[in-house]
Image: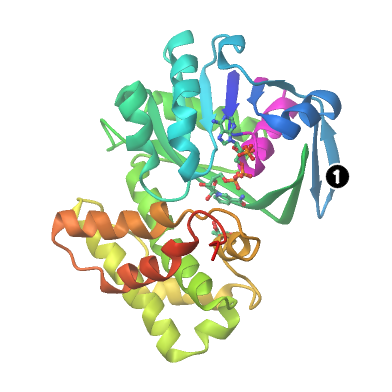
Amino acid sequence: MRFAIVGSGAVGGYFGAKLVQAGHEVTFLARGAHLEALRQKGLEIRSPVGDVRVPVRAESDPARVGPVDVVMLAVKTYDIAGALPAVKTLVESGDKTVVLTLQNGVDSPDEVASAVGQEAVLGGSAYISVAITAPGVLTQTGMHHRITFGEFFGDTTRLSPRVETLRDTLAGAGIRTDAVPDARVSLWDKLVFLAPFAGLTGSTRLPIGLLRTCPPALDTYLQAASEIIRVAAAEGVTVTRGPESLVRELQGLPPQMRASLLVDLEQGKRLEVEALMGSVVRRGRSAGVPTPVMATLYGVLAPYASGRPQS
Ligand SMILES: NC(=O)C1=CN([C@@H]2O[C@H](COP(=O)(O)OP(=O)(O)OC[C@H]3O[C@@H](n4cnc5c(N)ncnc54)[C@H](OP(=O)(O)O)[C@@H]3O)[C@@H](O)[C@H]2O)C=CC1
Ligand SMILES: CC(C)(CO)C(=O)C(=O)O
């Protein structure tokens, strides 16, 4: 299969490299020093089971890529608008090209569909812990990796043939893959865990071990999660994670674990506050569902959304 990776950072680079190793034709769209490193040295992935270096084809201009079957969109949520012209060029160069969105949050499929149409879009979530640690270098923490994806628009009652084909291709490349009939459920399922986790670890600057043993903090987490479950329900999506399973998941995490949002905050980087908290608050307002806890977490973190505030 032919793939283009738009946003060849941590997530896009990791999964794209697996596809290259399996013999697929993959072009990585990248820019700056990362692009130069990819061209000159390939993509290096450091992980607990060893390091690999994968030679890759990297381009800056989507018009040079040619027709592809799948665009993997793996930019951060705040970079989607800037990446849409490239995605549009790639979809228009192909025949039935699909775009698989891999962002956290639930907004990406709609944003992408506004540029290329709903028919071209599949919704996905990445489960992995990986970061760009130098141009051309990714470092993976832990060994887990998974992509959950499916149709986001149209018939979401069954696995579509194109979802089955992509599932088989990804699985054949050694990527752990869950194909689901309705990607809206899996995107909201991740958000219901992640947004309160990122909101609480981010606003307190504390790891989960200190929060889950503090009853008021745990209560804040669960109230935030309940708000998200109600907003999803108002949009017709039944989230499968409830309070008991969320508490079990929190108890199972390493005590030092912090959301990537907190790691980014401490490094003065931009944050996906709009996609994780702002989106819930706005959607709640539209649906008439109160979200006071999520609104508070949003208000506390929004000043950091563009990076470390300059006083
Ligand atoms: N990393 C992880 O472990 C996980 C991440 N996610 C989610 O996956 C998504 C991607 O995150 P992640 O991979 O970490 O992000 P990264 O910052 O590592 O990678 C994003 C890449 O996209 C590039 N980019 C941005 N805009 C464009 C553009 N217009 N054209 C070409 N390249 C562009 C960036 O380049 P530049 O640096 O030049 O801006 C960067 O290399 C996020 O929504 C994140 O929440 C989900 C689960 C785990
Ligand atoms: C699921 C989790 C918590 C894994 O790091 C994550 O996606 C994040 O921190 O952003």
Q: Position of residue 26 (x, y in %)?
A: 66, 21
Residue 25 belongs to magenta span: yes
Which colour assignment does the render follow? rainbow
Q: If the picture is divided into quarters, which one holds ligand 2?
A: bottom right
Q: Is residue 164 above or below residue 198?
A: above
Viewed as shown, does residue 49 lie left or right of 294? Answer: right
Q: Does residue 198 appear in this view?
A: yes
Q: Position of residue 48 (x, y in %)?
A: 81, 55
Kindly indicate the quadrant of the structure image that contains residue 290. bottom left
- The residue pinned by badge 1 equals 51
Predominant secondary structure, magenta span: helix
Identity of the amino acid at label 1?
Asp
Q: Quadrant of the C terminus?
A: bottom right
Viewed as shown, does residue 39 lie left or right of 85? Answer: right
Say what secondary structure mark 1 lies in: strand
User: Which residue sits at x=36%, y=74%?
Assistant: 243
Residue 14 belongs to magenta span: yes
User: Which residue sits at x=60%, y=35%?
Assistant: 171
Residue furthest out toward the front? 311
Q: Is residue 267 above or below residue 67?
A: below
What segment carries the magenta color?
A: 8-26
Crowd rating for badge 1 (residues with CA inside 10 Å; few <14, some 14–19, many 20+):
few
Nearest the eye: 100 or 65: 65
Viewed as shown, does residue 144 lie left or right of 69? Answer: right
Q: Is residue 1 above or below residue 203?
A: above
Q: Does residue 94 appear in this view?
A: no
